[in-house]
Amino acid sequence: MASLHTPGPWIFFSMPGGNWGIRHQSEHRSGGMHADVNCLNRHTVEAIDAARANAQLIAAAPDMLAAIIEAEWWMAQDPTRYPGTLIKLRNAIAKAEGGS
């Protein structure tokens, strides 16, 4: 199945109120597509830090998916060596690509 997501690299940027945005590196802030990570409790440093960490994780998703796909290919060359890990990799790829 071909991925329908916007390919990376994605970056994250700060927005007002402790919120964060995620967009493709080449898109300007005022145009293109982006996602928001909202900090629901702006009164605690922990909540603001968690929102930033979540935005960083989401921004890294295209790079992580590419690495997981490559690792799955290499591990599939000897599927009996680490069968549990191979299943986890395949499940992660399916989840990222909209499967189950």
Image (spheres, rainbow, N blue to C red):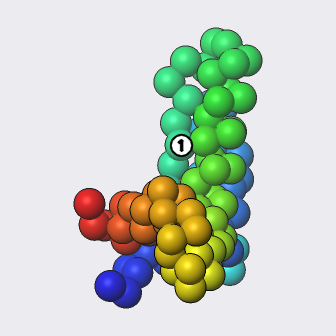
Instruction: Name the residue at the front extreme.
Output: 80
Along the line of sight, the residue nearer the viewer: 50 or 18: 50
Q: Is residue 38 above or below residue 34?
A: above
Instruction: Report helix, strand or loop for mark 1.
Output: strand
Quadrant into which the C terminus falls: bottom left
- Residue kind at label 1, given as amino acid type: Val
* Total numbered circles: 1
- Pick whichever, 80 or 71, lies toward us: 80
Q: Position of residue 46 (x, y in %)?
A: 69, 18
Residue for badge 1: 37
Residue drawn at (58%, 68%) of the image? 81
Left or right: residue 4 versus residue 71 is left
Instruction: Identify which residue, 78 or 42, lies in the foreground.
Output: 78
Residue drawn at x 65%, y 30% is: 50
Q: Is residue 56 above or below residue 83?
A: above
Q: Is residue 79 left or right of residue 94?
A: right
Q: Is residue 32 visible?
A: no
Q: Measured from the top left, where is residue 44 in percent x and y?
A: 67, 13
Residue 31: x and y in percent read 54, 73
Left or right of 15, for residue 2:
left
Q: Which of the 4 image quarters holds residue 62?
A: bottom right
User: How dense is the environment of label 1, judged by Cα within 10 Å: few (below 14), some, or many (20 and up)?
Assistant: many
**Residue for point 68% across, 56% down:** 12
Residue 24, image x, y percentages: 61, 72
